[in-house]
Image (spheres, helix red, strand yellow):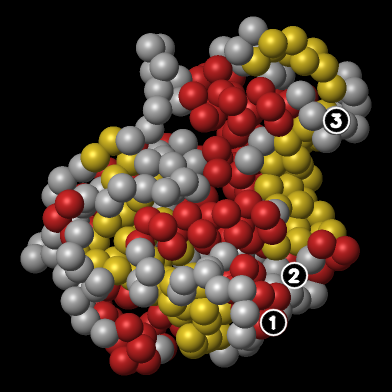
Amino acid sequence: MTGLELVDRDDDGVDRAFRADVLAGLSQDQKAIPARWFYDELGSELFEDITVQPEYYPTRAETEILDRCASEFADAIGAGQAVVEFGSGSSVKTPLLLRAIQPAAYVPLDISGDFLRAAAADLSAKFPGLPVHPVEADFMRRVELPAEIGALPKLGFFPGSTIGNMVAPTAVDLLRNMGQTLGTGSMLLIGMDLVKDAAILEAAYDDAAGVTAAFNLNLAHRVNGELGGTIPVDQLRHVARWNDDFARIEMHLEAQCDITFEVAGQPLTMVEGETIHTENSHKFTARSANMLLLCGGWTPLKRWTDTEDRFSLILAQSTPPRSAP
């Protein structure tokens, strides 16, 4: 197993992109921090805990698809691919795919280095003959892949409906960057959650055990720890709500009283009821999913859903841009 670190850090070890995103987001009228910054080591561990909560159906639904349709994935994708996973591998979902398609190499990309290396080591132990090349990088941008897989055909794997965390322009940019990372003609297997009853969706993002609340609040703890922040985390509360106009669940951190704090030396205030918007989780129909992929340079090839039609996995191929039929 080899590794490559590409995160841009300053002399104090602070991720420059993290600091820039936080300061820009907290200076807006609607304060916001991009959801990708949830995933420090603790945040990644908390998300794994979320996936086993009884209210959180996406992981069970996606796992069912990967397990039940293994032979169909093998037929559609073929053996000998270099599987490039955008995000550290799930201990359950990723092995199901790897066993189904018999890849030539596995390349997990993740911005959380410690969690990335732990996940890569776990996959190496489960697949001792498979070359594993973890790359610590911000996969929202084009990533240089390890030279060892340069000649191999490539399959991007982006499970979990993480694409739904992004507003449409950001999602399209990511899909285009994935195409640049993987190359024209490569394939992408991507998870997209489906539109359903609002009560089911809100419960999935506000579980009774409070794990999602801890996950959301950990983002404020991360800002404090890495950016010299003084956010009074105990005066914030987790909020999850369905926005029907935009077909998405929104997560916020809401101030329970007027608060003042600093981040990286910048003074900030929030009044009671004001929020920091931390996550969107867009839900899709078959048509909206296909349109998003096409806008990002990917032609949908095949679609699978779980037996309750809650979740979808879509196989698409990177295609050159064209302006006419």
Which quadrant of the structure image shows residue 92? bottom left
- Name the kind of residue labelled 1 in the image: Arg
- Dot label at residue 200: 2
Residue hosting label 1:
287
Q: Give how far across and how far down residue 154 sits, in percent.
A: 29, 69
Using the image, determine if residue 224 lies above or below residue 216. Answer: above
- Whichever of callouts 1 and 2 sits on the residue coming sooner in the sequence is 2
- Mark 3: secondary structure: loop
Q: Is residue 221 left or right of residue 269?
A: left
- Name the kind of residue labelled 2 in the image: Ile
Q: Give how far across and how far down residue 215 sits, in percent.
A: 59, 42
Which quadrant of the structure image shows residue 296? bottom right
Residue hosting label 3:
29
- Name the kind of residue labelled 3 in the image: Asp
Which of 300/29 is in front? 300
Which of 68/34 is in front? 34
Residue drawn at 49 percent across, 41 percent down: 39
Where's the C terminus, which quadrant? Answer: bottom right
Contact? badges 1 and 3 (CB < 8 Å):
no
- Mark 2: secondary structure: helix
Q: Give how far across and how far down residue 278 sits, in percent.
A: 69, 41
Residue drawn at 31 percent across, 47 percent down: 144
Q: Is residue 171 left or right of residue 152?
A: right
Using the image, determine if residue 151 lies above or below residue 316. Answer: above
